[in-house]
Image (cartoon, rainbow, N blue to C red):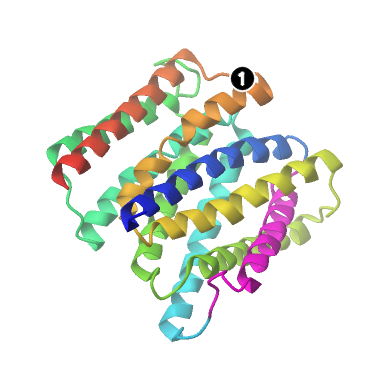
């Protein structure tokens, strides 16, 4: 594989694993609180990532890290707290996990803007049309009542917050991926989110013990999510632009759609389905524009 092909493969693997995150987390959040979920989810994620770190080929190393790199890790940890907490809060309150997964496509819009400003990435007029379609589709996906008279839901507001901060995270990771490896970034993320969830467990005086089925869902989800998805996402950024990785990952909603039907017997409303289709078409235009301009 050449570097570009390797980057797209990592992005695709991150997409498949990321779609399972919505399904396993939704199943677990039906039984436990957000704080309990976060504690076990990221405690296990830390275990998986630490196992990768101690492996001879894990790629974990603190050699060469300077004060600026540690400041970057702290900043990214704080950004992750906002982005990830908002994401799982949206999944928890959403009737169908497909809805927040489609709304996650908004992240690409923010990445595009930040990519142009900070990374000097160029986009054509066709990319702009695609971006507009993604935004339009996301609006219909996020309608609260499934019709034009409805107001945007709380899920939409949380996903807007989440995707904006995830875009910041992605751009920061892209800028520093050569100095700070994927496993280091994944471990840093797990530590910050585990500490944050632990704080809320204590403040809310919630028990650590959870039902067995919820733990099994968290066990599986934390392996494919904070571990595999994070590592594959960061690995993709080593070989391809942040915008190209985001394009591949924007198809996550289609995988979640099928999984949600199988696991929960749920489908979005007709209007939300149409909005999701528009976002996919918008992303396809953006991919086409990148191919032409590239």
In the image, what residue occupies the spot 38% across and 23% down? Answer: 277
Label 1 CA crowd tier, 10 Å (few <14, some 14–19, many 20+): some
Q: Is residue 235 left or right of residue 266?
A: left
Instruction: Tell me: 293 left or right of 21.
Output: left
Q: Is residue 253 above or below residue 216?
A: above
Q: In the drawing, does residue 25 fall left or right of residue 2?
A: right
Q: Residue furthest front?
A: 1
Whole-percent x, y for residue 1 in the image: 37, 54
Query: Relative to residue 47, is residue 9 drawn left or right?
Result: left
Picture layout, residue 70 above or below residue 159: below
Residue 193: give x, y in percent of width and height: 62, 61
Does residue 180 appear in the picture of this structure? yes
Residue at x 55%, y 63% (from the top left corner) = 186
Percent position (x, y) of residue 238?
38, 62
Provide the residue span drawn in magenta.
32-61
Residue 247 lies, with reference to residue 53, above or below; the image says: above
Q: Nearer the viewer, residue 89 or 123?
A: 123
Q: Which residue is mark 1?
A: 266
Numbered-mark total: 1
Q: Main secondary structure of the magenta part?
A: helix
Q: Is residue 256 magenta?
A: no
- Residue nearer the viewer, 21 or 56: 56
Confirm whether residue 153 shows in the render.
no
- Examine the rendered structure and indicate whether residue 234 appears above or below residue 277: below
Secondary element under disc 1, as helix, strand or loop, is loop
Residue 132 x %, y %: 25, 33
**Res 47 quadrant in image:** bottom right
């Amino acid at each position: 594989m050449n570097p570009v092909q390797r980057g797209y493969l990592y992005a695709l693997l991150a997409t498949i694993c990321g779609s399972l995150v919505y399904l396993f987390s939704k199943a677990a959040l039906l039984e436990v609180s957000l704080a309990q979920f976060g504690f076990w989810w990221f405690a296990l994620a830390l275990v998986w990532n630490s196992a990768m770190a101690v492996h001879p080929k894990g790629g974990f190393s603190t050699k060469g890290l300077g004060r600026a790199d540690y400041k970057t890790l702290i900043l990214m940890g704080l950004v992750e707290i906002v982005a990830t907490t908002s994401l799982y809060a949206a999944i928890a309150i959403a009737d169908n996990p497909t809805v927040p997964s489609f709304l996650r496509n908004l992240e690409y819009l923010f990445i595009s803007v930040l990519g142009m400003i900070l990374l000097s990435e160029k986009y054509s007029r066709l990319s702009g049309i695609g971006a507009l379609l993604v935004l339009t589709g996301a609006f219909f996906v996020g309608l609260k009542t499934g019709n034009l008279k409805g107001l945007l839901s709380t899920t939409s507001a949380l996903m807007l917050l989440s995707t904006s901060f995830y875009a910041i995270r992605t751009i920061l990771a892209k800028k520093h991926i050569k100095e700070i490896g994927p496993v280091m970034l994944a471990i840093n993320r797990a530590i910050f989110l585990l500490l944050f969830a632990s704080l809320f467990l204590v403040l809310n005086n919630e028990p650590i013990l959870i039902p067995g089925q919820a733990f099994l869902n968290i066990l599986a989800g934390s392996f494919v999510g904070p571990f595999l998805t994070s590592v594959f996402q960061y690995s993709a950024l080593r070989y391809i632009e942040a915008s190209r990785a985001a394009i591949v990952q924007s198809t996550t909603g289609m995988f979640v759609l099928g999984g949600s039907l199988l696991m929960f017997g749920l489908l979005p409303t007709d209007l939300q389905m149409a909005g999701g289709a528009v976002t996919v078409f918008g992303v396809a235009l953006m991919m086409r524009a990148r191919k032409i301009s590239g």
